[in-house]
Image (tube, rainbow, N blue to C red):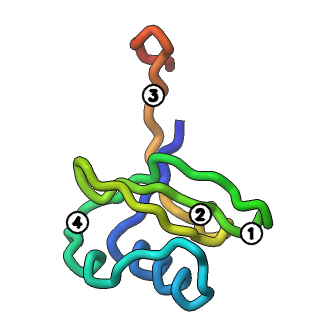
Amino acid sequence: MEIRYFTKQSLIEANKEAVRNNYEKSLSTKALEELNEESKFPIVFHIVGSDKRLVATELLLGPETTVWLDISKHRYVDLPYLEVDAPDLDGGTRH
């Protein structure tokens, strides 16, 4: 299973695009400035918009902090990802 993620820099760039293009979901610039430079911010849920150009992403900024950001489909596809084992329904791990 692929888990796509943002770096701080890629998140700032994606947010600038969201603001510039008046996407529905964008983030506070101040909140982004306070993020750790070394952290990765995984996308925990995503859904393609009805116009097929945007992807609404829910991402994890901290242990109990999730936010939503709209990004272009192209940006989503270009994000780096980690390959992880998907859990089985019985709580084990599927390989």
Does dot 3 land on a helix, a strand or a loop? loop
User: Vertical placement of 90 versus 59: above or below?
Assistant: above
Separation of residues labelled 4 and 3 (CA atoms): 24 Å
Residue 42, position as x, y percentages in the image: 40, 53
Q: What residue type is labelled 3?
A: Asp
Q: Residue 53 carries which label?
A: 1
Residue 52, position as x, y percentages in the image: 78, 63
Q: Do the residues labelled 2 and 1 touch (CB within 8 Å)?
A: no
Separation of residues labelled 4 and 1 (CA atoms): 30 Å
Q: What residue type is labelled 2?
A: Tyr
Q: Name the residue under label 2.
A: 76
Separation of residues labelled 3 and 2 (CA atoms): 21 Å
- The residue carrying pointer 2 sits among few (fewer than 14), some (14 to 19) or many (20 or more) residues within 10 Å by Cα, namely many
Q: Mark 4 points at which residue?
A: 38
Separation of residues labelled 3 and 1 (CA atoms): 29 Å
Does dot 4 land on a helix, a strand or a loop? loop
Q: Name the residue under label 3.
A: 85
Q: Which residue is depicted at the point 40% across and 13% down?
A: 91
